[in-house]
Amino acid sequence: MTVANDDVGLRLESLLWSRVKEQNRRILKNKSKILVHYTSSSTLLNILQRQEVWMRNARGMNDFSEIRYARKLFLSYFLDQNRRAVFAKACNDCHKNSFVSLSNFFDGNISYVENQTYITCLSIHDKKKDAGGRLSMWRGYGGGAVAAAVVIKKHSVMNLPFGIIGVKVEYPDEKGFFESIDEIKDYLIMHKNAFSSVPADIFIKFIVAKLQIILSTTKHPGFREEEEWRLLYMPNMFKSDPLEALKAQAAPKGIPETIYKIPIGKALGPQAVATVDELVEQVIIGPCAEVDLAILAIKDALNEAKHRRWDKVVRSCGIPYRERI
């Protein structure tokens, strides 16, 4: 995406990414923080054998109800006529009548965000406090299956190619959510002259992208202890031809859905993502009756996937297994 001049381009980029980049910088710099992906052991085996990670549509995620929470707050903000008028003026002062295009997004097509957002979920853990994983997550990913937590080497996912971005999930109450929308409005007012110089369609696209990111990374405060960090792909905003070539259909829970496959250790044109060895720092097996059997199988799969420390990076969470009643 190009804009009229470098200065305005930087301001638009700052509107979108300044907070995201700062949050990611802090996570990367903090040695006590780790990124963990919870899944079932069977899914982990598929990832290692197929050398790919799936990004699923937001509507197919376990916590789709949390997108509805963000939607409710979003609509509440713009149903207030005073807030709506102030935000509209900030947009229209940059580009005449631009809020009309944006309001179509607000008022009738917000489900478009859900349909055009693909997600892979991770959690931010404290290396010592969460050494055995997080019990709520083990329970959430158990369900009769053997759960696994993959500790990811942070630097390998902070700058992924193919238009994929990593964003920390926020857990605001209504006041906090409204403040995040106000920040957009205030930024538009502050840089009105600069934004007036770019084509209206690009200006509108950036605003919609910012709102889409907020909607896709907002969850109810009751889930704050999860400390989620999401990989996002938004094909409507930042389409990647290499990733589009890996678009597919699957039915992971019996319901057909579209997915995107992130290749592991494979080049697509000039771009490539990390290998299994570069991605996986450790694998923790959740509570189960036959933990030694599960550990052995995951070790073998890591070995076949050419992880150099396959025999040293898999362990049990140490939490006693409790039979379901």
Image (spheres, rainbow, N blue to C red):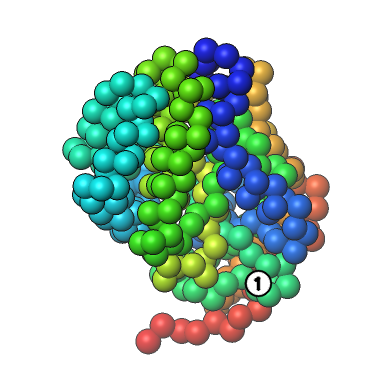
Give the total number of marks visible in the rendering. 1
Q: Nearer the viewer, residue 141 or 175?
A: 175
Image-based side of 195 in relation to 23, left or right: left
- Identify residue for label 1: 130
**Residue in the picture at 33% in, 39% down:** 87
Residue 121 visible to an observer of this rendering: yes
Q: As drawn, which residue projects farthest toward the bottom?
A: 325
Res 282 → quadrant: bottom right
Res 69 → quadrant: bottom left
For label 1, the crowd category at 10 Å Cα-Cα, with few meaning under 14, some 14 to 19 and many 20 or more, is: some
**Residue in the picture at 50% in, 35% down:** 190
Give percent across and percent down for residue 58: 37, 46
Amino acid on which the number 1 mark rests in the picture: Asp
Q: Nearer the viewer, residue 304 or 74?
A: 74
Residue 255 visible to an observer of this rendering: no
Res 235 → quadrant: top left
**Residue in the picture at 48% in, 57% down:** 170
Q: Nearer the viewer, residue 272 or 27?
A: 27
Give percent across and percent down for residue 127: 72, 67
**Residue in the picture at 45% in, 34% down:** 188
The answer to whether 139 is drawn above or below residue 64 in the figure is below
As helix, strand or loop, the secondary structure at mark 1 comes to loop
Give percent across and percent down for residue 187: 49, 38
Give percent across and percent down for residue 90: 37, 34
Question: From the image, which quarter does the C terminus lie in?
Answer: bottom left
